[in-house]
Amino acid sequence: MSDAPVHTPTMSTFDPYSIPLDELDLIRNDIFHHDKHVKIFERLRKEDPIHWQKDHESAGSFWNITKYEDIMYVDTHHELFSSDGSIVVDDQDEEFPLPMFIAMDPPKHDQQRKEVSPVVAPRNLAEMEGTIRLRVQNILDSLPIGEEINWVDLVSIELTTQMLATLFDFPFEDRRKLTRWSDVATADVEAGDIVESEDQRRAELIECLEYFQNLWHQRQNDPNPGFDLVSMLAHGESTKNMDPVEYLGNLVLLIVGGNDTTRNSITGGVNFLNVFPKEYDKLRANPSLITTMVPEIIRYQTPLAYMRRTALTDTELGGKQIKKGDKILMWYVSGNRDADVIEQPDDFIIDRKRPRNHLSFGFGIHRCMGNRLAEMQLRILWEEIMLRFDNIEVVGEPVMVRSSFVKGYSELPVILHKKTT
C-alpha cells in the first residue's frame, strides 16, 4: 500500500479529463503553479502520447512527447532532432538572443561543453566534498529550532548559491545576484512576479553580463588560470573568443543548471517526505537509504519540466508524422511518471530497486553535465539533516513558481524538530 498524500490540491474543480484534447494548454504556468499537471499528462500518456498542440498564442504549434521511451528516442537521436536555437518552446527574442552550448548541435556543442566539464570531473568532485559538507553544516546549524521558516530561502537557495559562487569563483558577498539572475532568466513575464517585461529581463541580464565581463578580463590575463568556470571559458580554445552575447548565454545555462535544479530538489525532498510520511519513517529507521532516496527525489521533482528540440527532417514517431522544422517538447515531467517503465510512478519510494531510472538529467550528448554534483549536494545535505533533526515538518502549503519550464518552489514553510536520541 502507498501512503495517502497529506496535502490536498488547491484547484479542486480542475478536471483535465473534461477538456477536449485539442484545447489542452500544456504550457500554462498556472497548471504547474497549482501542481495540476500530473493528471493532464496521465491522460495524454493514455490517449494521445504524442500530442500536437496547434496555434498557441505565444509558442505557435508543437509536438508534446509524453512517454518515457519516446522521450528517450528523441533525446538520443540528435541527428534527427536538433537542439540548435532554443531549449524552451517560446522562440528567443530576436533582438536579444542567448546562444548557449545546450542549445547547439555538434561539433560546436561538444567543443564548448568540453571546456567546462572538468569542473565536475570525479577528482574535482571529491575535492569539493569537504567544502560542501562544511557549508551544509554551517547553514543547518544557523537555523532556529521550533520556529516557522521558509526552507526555500534559508536552505535551498543559500546552499546552491554558495555552490555556484564556488564554481564561478564569484565574489561571495554578491552571491545572491546569481540567484536573482537565474530567476530572471527563467521567469514567465506574463506572471509578473519576478520581471514585469522583456525590457526588464534584458536590463538585468545585461547587468549580469557586465559583472561577468569584469571577471573574464581579470582572469583572461592571468598566466596561472584558476579551476573555475569563468577561467575555463576565458582560456578555452573554443570559447576564449566568444561573442559577449554567447558568453552571457553560456553563463545563464551554467547558472540555471547549477541553481534551479538542485535548489528545487532540495525543497522537493522535504516536501515529499511530509506528503509520504511512511517514507520518512523508513529514512529515520535506516539513514543509509539516502543513497537511493536522492535519485528518487530528482525523479519525483523533475526540476526542469521539458526540453525542446526541432525536427531536422521528416520522420515518424509513435505513428505520428513529424515534419522538418516542427517544434518538439520532451516532457521529462511526464516520462518520469510513465507506468510502463517505472513501477508505482506516482508514489515517492525511497528504496526503489532502480532509482536512477529517470529522465530528469536527460540523455545523449546533452545529458546534464552536473548530475553527479547535484546528487552529491543532496546526499551530503540529507546526511547532515539526519544527524540534527528528528523531523522537518511542513506546516503550510508549498508555493510553486509560475513557470511551465522550471518546476520549482518559492516557499516551503517548515518547523525543525531537533533530534533527541
Image (spheres, rainbow, N blue to C red):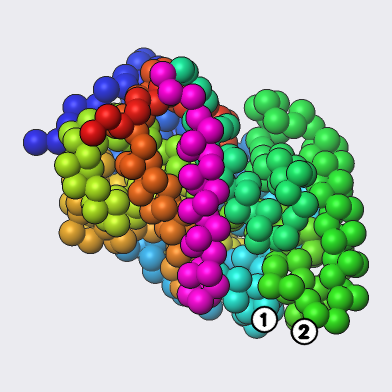
Q: Earlier in the sequence, mark 2 or mark 1?
A: 1
Residue nearer the viewer, 395 or 250: 395
Q: Would residue 59 be seen by someone viewing this image from the given angle?
A: yes
Residue nearer the viewer, 284 or 336: 284
Circle 2/circle 1 CB separation < 8 Å = yes
Locate residue 98 relative to residue 280 in the image: left or right: right
Q: Relative to 85, does residue 107 appear above or below in the rendering?
A: below
Q: Relative to 146, does residue 27 appear above or below in the rendering?
A: below
Residue drawn at (52%, 55%) of the image: 132
Residue nearer the viewer, 95 or 272: 272
Q: Residues within 10 Å of mark 1 (few under 14, many from 20)?
A: some
What kind of secondary structure does the magenta stretch mostly adopt?
helix
Q: Quadrant of residue 312?
A: bottom right
Residue drawn at (87%, 41%) of the image: 203
Front disc: 2 or 1: 2
Mark 1 belongs to which amino acid? Gln
Q: What stretch of residues is rendered in magenta? A: 121-146
Residue drawn at (70%, 26%) of the image: 192
| Residue 215, position as x, y percentages in the image | 85, 61
Q: What residue sits right under mark 2 in the picture?
A: 237
Locate residue 386 relative to residue 402 in the image: left or right: left
Q: Secondary structure at mark 1?
A: helix
Q: What residue sits right under mark 1 in the picture?
A: 111
Locate residue 270 relative to residue 349 in the image: left or right: right
